[in-house]
Amino acid sequence: MHQNRKRILQSPFIYVSSSTQTVLSVMICLLVPQLIMLFLTKSYASLFVLLSAVLASLLAEAFYHLKKPTSSVMLLIALLQGLLVGFLLPSSYPPAAVFFITFCAMLVGKYAFEGFAASWVNPVALAVAAAYFIYACPFPPFAVDLSILREKNAALSLIREGVFPISALDSRVTDFLNRNVFRHFGMEIPDGYVTLFWDSGSPIPAFRFNLLNLIASLILFSGDMVGFLIPVSFCISYGLLIRFVPLSVLTGTQLYGDIFLAFLTSGVLFSTLFILQWFGTVPYTAWGKLLYGLCAGLFSYLILGYGTSSIGYVFVVLIMNFISIFIQSFETRRMKVFYRKSIRPRLEALKEVLSV
């Protein structure tokens, strides 16, 4: 007996934004080039840390959903969270410790903070902060001794002191850019900045490939997969503070901030793109997101200073998760007032018209 099959088409519908599954899939795909770069640079210790974090996150997800099947979206979330935790931990961490800490932190995040999207605490930041406290150690080369700073420009001093190892191609690329690009503007860049863009050599993978992070941000922003208001307001706030507010308050040294150094170290580009505006932890109105980004820039200045911090951005995220509670609470009250004063009277008037 022949049975007609009916297909449901999407043609009458218009999607105003990408689905969560699509956004998660694209984010994971954008992290793959960095995994390839870790393999090509023989950073096997970082890859083992990443593998441990991913397995722990997936296991925590499976454990949390023992009584019901895990959806494909939740598996993608667990995979992305595991990758982000692994990227933010140094290669010196033992994989076994990474697995245990990530598994426990993810379970605590699911049970204590209500899981995905409803959570007010970023589980990735929670896991990385827990790893830092449980297995604390210095993170060279970004645990910088301020006594080596001799110049007003922090980046030049750190590069010349060898804190950032310069790649072999840095001088060639820098000379090419200075001859063909920057000389037309009456300026030039010193050796070292190209290395910071391409591969800073940090033991923390999220700090290394800033050019790939910039490309990933362009893809996500151009596809409207992530909001740009929080990252843009954060960058403006943090950049202006670094450039114009004296850092002597934080360092005790008369030191001018270098915006390139600030954004190319401490995992600023990576963390701003992937964890600062995690699902469910940010305000939902335009002014709320703007305030969130500006506050994040202020706390980044207070905690990260001119950059080179190994763990500071994670604590910026956790602080902003707490502040976001109050912003969202104020947003909710304003929405209720707006409904009571504007929407409800219109609905009641419409009912009267329809009842006539």
Image (cartoon, helix red, strand yellow):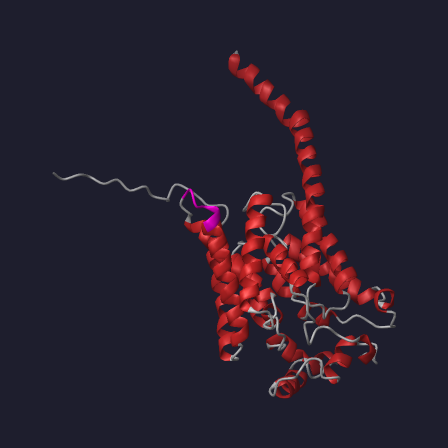
Q: Nearer the viewer, residue 309 or 194?
A: 309
Q: Is residue 67 magenta?
A: yes
Side of 218 relative to 342 (left or right): left
Q: Quadrant of the N terminus?
A: top left
Quarter holding residue 132: bottom right
Residue 21 visible, this angle: no
Callout count: 0
Side of 53 relative to 151 (left or right): left
Give the main secondary structure of the magenta stretch: loop
**Residue 292 in the image, given as x and y percentages of width and height:** 70, 50
Residue 62, compared with residue 202, is above or below; it is above
Q: Residue visible at 57% across and 66% down?
A: 87
Q: Residue visible at 59% across and 46% down?
A: 280
Residue placed furthest toward the top: 356
Q: Residue visible at 43% across and 46% down?
A: 66
**Residue 354 in the image, given as x and y percentages of width and height:** 52, 16
Q: Nearer the viewer, residue 204 or 193?
A: 204
**Residue 150 in the image, given as x and y percentages of width and height:** 84, 81
Q: Nearer the viewer, residue 205 or 102?
A: 102
**Residue 65 in the image, given as x and y percentages of width and height:** 45, 46
Residue 335, compared with residue 57, is above or below; it is above
Q: Is residue 17 magenta?
A: no
Residue 33 visible, this angle: yes
**Residue span colored magenta:** 63-68
